[in-house]
Image (tube, grey):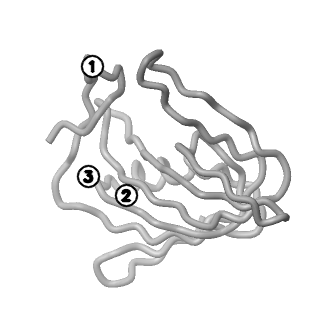
Amino acid sequence: MKAVRNGYYWQLRLMPGEEIVETLMGFVRSRRIKSGFLTGIGAAENVVLGCFAPRTKTYHKRIFKGDHEIVALVGNVAWAGKDPVCHIHTVISTPRLATYAGHLFSGTVTVTLEVAFVPGTRRLQRKPDPLSGLNLLAL
């Protein structure tokens, strides 16, 4: 990954072969970023998206093999204890221009992933929510 500070935000470029979520969490950890939000576009393969089912408190996951355009990627960053959490949703497009969207669990960059990352000034935490079973922002 390449990164450059651009005023109040970071411009990131993930490289082919890099795993998206792991690479972004590594960036947050290495720069000791307290919180933030991100947006991006690019291309990836072996993308795993999910949709949360509140009744069962589980995610329905689907793997999208092959090349896909990342039409939109949005998310936020907080911490769960000592670990950063990148909560990311994305829209991907197939070669036939069909789109799919959901919570991004993983994906490998094929050409590039260009991400604008805006860091926050406060350290935000995620804590377990008894109703959903998810680790939600503790604001």
Name the residue type under label 3: Lys
76 lies above or below 54: below
**Contact, CB < 8 Å: mark 2 with mark 3?**
no
Residue nearest the viewer, comparing 15 with 66: 66
The numbered dot on residue 31 is 2
112 lies above or below 83: below
Name the residue type under label 1: Leu
Residue 6 position, x and y percent, is 38, 83
The residue at the point 51 percent across, 69 percent down is: 115
The numbered dot on residue 34 is 3
Q: Element at badge 2?
A: helix
User: Alpha-carbon distance for marks 1 and 3?
Assistant: 26 Å
Q: Element at badge 1?
A: loop
User: Alpha-carbon distance for marks 1 and 2?
Assistant: 33 Å
The residue at the point 46 percent across, 66 percent down is: 39
Name the residue type under label 2: Arg
- The quadrant the N terminus occupies is bottom right
